[in-house]
Image: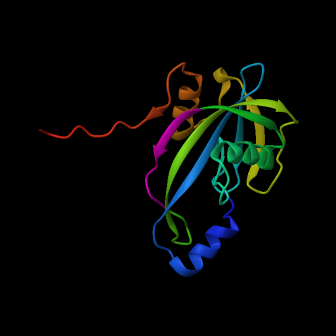
Amino acid sequence: MATPEFIRTIRASAGHQLLFLPGVTAVVFDDTGRVLLVRRADTGAWDLVGGIPEPGEQPAATAVREVYEETAVRCSAERVVLVQALEPMRYPNDDRCQFMDITFLCRATGGEARVNDDESLEVGWFSLDALPGLGAYASLRIEQALADKPTWFEPAPVEAS
């Protein structure tokens, strides 16, 4: 994921300290039930499309924008499937951040899947029975997008009485 300019501005004064940031993930399906994946340039791993909202941008608009920017696929966001605070992470340059991820189920509406920026090495549609090796992050999001259930979230801990 390329670092947005507004984050670079914050980093200029915040240094490497932990930033709590919004993040959006898109689980995009086509009409045949295949899921859209990208092979990330930074890790080489297959993953879902995601990104950081621009200031003032609605999360669903971020999902649609990121999918197009990274894959040239047009889509519409249908519903929120998951909300989750991710574990803090440290980048190779020592920047630290923690994302509050909002995952959307999206439907492809047009375009041809292809690498459309420098964030991906490959882009492709995959049937659910032929997914490349995915991490727990992507697998949970695909599972929740397929489930006919309310939005998934981590339950609050039960307080002792």
SS majority, magenta: strand
Percent x, y of residue 28: 70, 32
Q: In which quarter of the image is the C terminus?
A: top left
Would residue 45 be visible to someone looking at this image?
no
Q: Residue at x 76, y 25 (%)?
A: 30
Q: Residue at x 71, y 45 (%)?
A: 61
Q: In this view, does 88 lie to the left or right of 38?
A: left
Is residue 11 or residue 88 the one in the foreground? 11
Is residue 9 or residue 27 the one in the foreground? 9
Would residue 25 be visible to someone looking at this image?
yes
Percent x, y of residue 40: 68, 50
Q: Give the residue furthest to the front.
A: 56
Q: Does the magenta stretch include residue 78?
A: no
Please say if 41 is above or below 90. above
Q: How is the image coloured?
A: rainbow
Q: In which quarter of the image is the N terminus?
A: bottom right
Please say if 92 is above or below 155. below
Q: In this view, does 116 lie to the left or right of 95?
A: right
Is residue 127 or residue 156 the one in the foreground? 156
Q: In which quarter of the image is residue 93?
A: bottom right
Q: Residue at x 54, y 65 (%)?
A: 91
Please count the marks in the image.
Answer: 0
Q: In which quarter of the image is residue 26?
A: top right
Q: Give the residue furthest to the bottom.
A: 13
Please say if 105 is above or below 114. above
Q: Which residue is drawn at 65% across and 40% down?
A: 48
**Magenta segment:** 80-89
Percent x, y of residue 123: 77, 41
Percent x, y of residue 129: 64, 21
